[in-house]
Image (cartoon, helix red, strand yellow):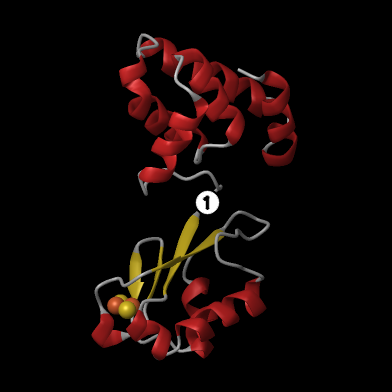
Amino acid sequence: MERIAVEALARREGGVGYAGRIFEQTQRIIHDTGGQAGALIRVLQQAQGMIGYLPPPVLKTISRDLKIPLSEVYGIVSFYHFFTMVPKGKHVIQVCMGTSCYVKGGQKLLDTLKKAVGLEPEGMTPDGKFSLETVRCLGACALSPVMTVGGDIHRKVEPAGVMEILSRYK
Ligand code: FES
């Protein structure tokens, strides 16, 4: 693994020991799959399960050790929606910006999250508690605007009620 890059990541993310753990565990995942190119998705899934997301140094290591072009690794990560290259918070907030929710106040929910807890789409609170995503239609248009927190769906959300909803998540 590109240890220096991972150590830089570690300083940002988790301090001493974090780089070593990522380095060893990613190597173990690759070793367990026999380093076969066909194991790419499994390696990516396990690496994301371990780290929480797929930062560039991890993708470079996987590319090198599985002998798969980095562009191909990035292609797979961007194709499958369950892979992410950005860290996620303990509780992921999704605000629906589909047509119905947008018309009924989805943008106001985003504005409230930005104002109240400093969250921007694809961002995360400094304590790592919440991260924010926007999505297109959660299938509950009749009850828009809709947001989810940690997979729980909240319907007809008023901007004034956003903080009360977040307070339920520890
Ligand atoms: S548009 Fe938001 S649930 Fe359908």
The location of residue 21, given as percent across then percent down, is: 59, 22
Instruction: Identify the residue at horizontal 49%, vertical 40% (top origin).
Output: 52
Task: Please give left or right for residue 103 compared with residue 5 in the image.
Answer: left
Q: How many numbered circles are shown?
A: 1
Mark 1, Cα crowd under 10 Å, few <14 / some 14-19 / many 20+, is: many
Please tell me in which quarter of the rendered image ligand 1 is found.
bottom left
In the image, residue 82 sits, relative to residue 26, either above or below, namely: below
Tell me if I can see residue 145 in this picture.
no
Q: Viewer-proximal residue, 166 or 68?
A: 68
Instruction: Identify the residue at horizontal 36%, vertical 8% (top origin).
Output: 34
Q: Report whether the residue tagged 1 is closer than 8 Å to ligand 1.
A: no
Q: Pick the quarter of the image with the N terminus.
A: top right
Tell me the amino acid under the disc marked 1. Lys
Task: Please give left or right for residue 119 compared with residue 72 in the image.
Answer: right
Instruction: Identify the residue at horizontal 48%, vertical 58% (top origin).
Output: 91
Tell me if I can see residue 123 in this picture.
yes
Q: Quadrant of residue 149?
A: bottom left
The location of residue 78, given as percent across then percent down, is: 43, 44
The location of residue 155, given as percent across then percent down, is: 33, 81
Under circle 1, the secondary element is: loop
Q: Quadrant of residue 35?
A: top left
The location of residue 46, given as percent across then percent down, is: 40, 29
> Pointer 1: what residue?
88
Q: Quadrant of residue 112?
A: bottom right
